[in-house]
Amino acid sequence: MKRPADLLCAAVLVAGLAACGDEPEREPLPSGIVMHVDQTRLERKTRNVFVRVENNTKSPLTITGFVLSSPRFDRVTWQGDESMEPGQQADLEFTMPPGRCGDGVDASVRLTYRTGDSDERESVGRADDPFKAIGLLLDRDCARKTLAEAADLEVGTPQVEGTGPTSVLRVPITLTPTGKRDDVRFGGFESTPLFRQAGDSPVDVDEPISSEQPTRIVMSVVPARCDPHALAEDKVGRLFGMRVLAPGLPDNSWFYLPLDGDQQKAFYAYFRATCGV
């Protein structure tokens, strides 16, 4: 008498699909292999992220590939050859695909690896988001996508108003309606470590985005501090959060205002001229 498993394999073969024996064995991850998804602060204006693998076992570990899955982005495949001794860790870098709206990250990793002199094997494990950096990146994608459904965003040329320490840098922004939805609203801008929003800049607002004509907004900023170290050590000083309000979005949804190279240079030039550094 055939076993149920044999009957199942026969049915699969009749259907023209791969034989049961072709499915790779998925062992549980050995105790001590821990995985995280993360992004460093220096990479916040990019989509460069990584899976960090910690080898807390007593054997050398070699990673040759992984498949990263999440409901919030398309599947990511990585191949390489990364070895680590017991107690070491490795960051396996990749470019994050565009994110979808949702909650958390809920990342699963199918890891291909060897421990010590073992044959290559595959295991599936979870990867947490310890500092919520990946969740925030995906939330920014969601906010940007939501705004794009309602309006096309155009950032104009920054202009300096006034002279000396009392001058203000103003950035014109135009939101041209797409006609696809009329329930998205503008929530204001956020400051950065290098620049703060000026008194007349919209910060905590709730303004409808017109579905019939362009909405024009001006972001106005001044230096948050005036010392050479602030400029020399700056990494995120031009990453201005732009808040988006819409049904289904968390209350504090935002994304980075997109600035091209010339626009970014204008901020630094203004800082130097105003602060005299």
Image (cartoon, rainbow, N blue to C red):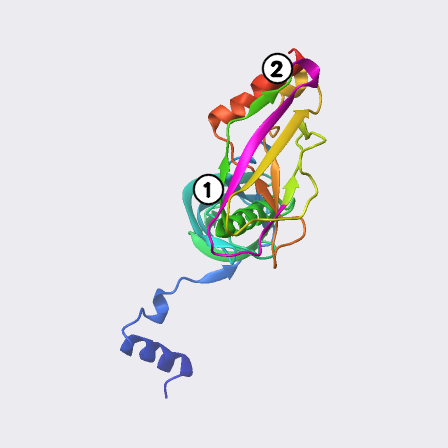
Can see residue 267?
no
User: The N terminus appears in which quarter of the rendering?
Assistant: bottom left
Which mark sits nearer the N-terminus, 1 or 2? 1
Pick the front one: 19 or 201: 201
SS at badge 1: strand
Check disc 1 and give the amino acid type: Thr
Residue contact at pointers 1 and 2, CB within 8 angstroms: no
Q: Quadrant of residue 183?
A: bottom right
Instruction: Kindly identify which numbered label has been placed on residue 272.
Output: 2
Q: What crowding class fits label 2: few (fewer than 14 Cα within 10 Å), some (14-19), or many (20 or more)?
A: some
Q: Quadrant of residue 102?
A: bottom right
Query: In the rendered image, which quarter is residue 15 located in?
Result: bottom left
Q: CA distance from mark 1 to mark 2?
A: 33 Å
User: Residue 20: within the magenta?
Assistant: no
In the picture of the structure, the residue carrying the numbered disc 1 is: 95
Q: Amino acid at mark 2?
A: Arg
Q: Quadrant of the C terminus?
A: top right
Compared across the picture, whether 109 is left or right of 58 comes to left
Other residues around mark 1 within 10 Å, as few (<14) / some (14–19) / many (≥20):
few
Name the residue nearer the viewer: 265 or 41: 265
Left or right, residue 118 beside residue 19: right
Q: Residue at x 67, y 24 (%)?
A: 222
Dot 2 falls on a residue whose secondary structure is: helix
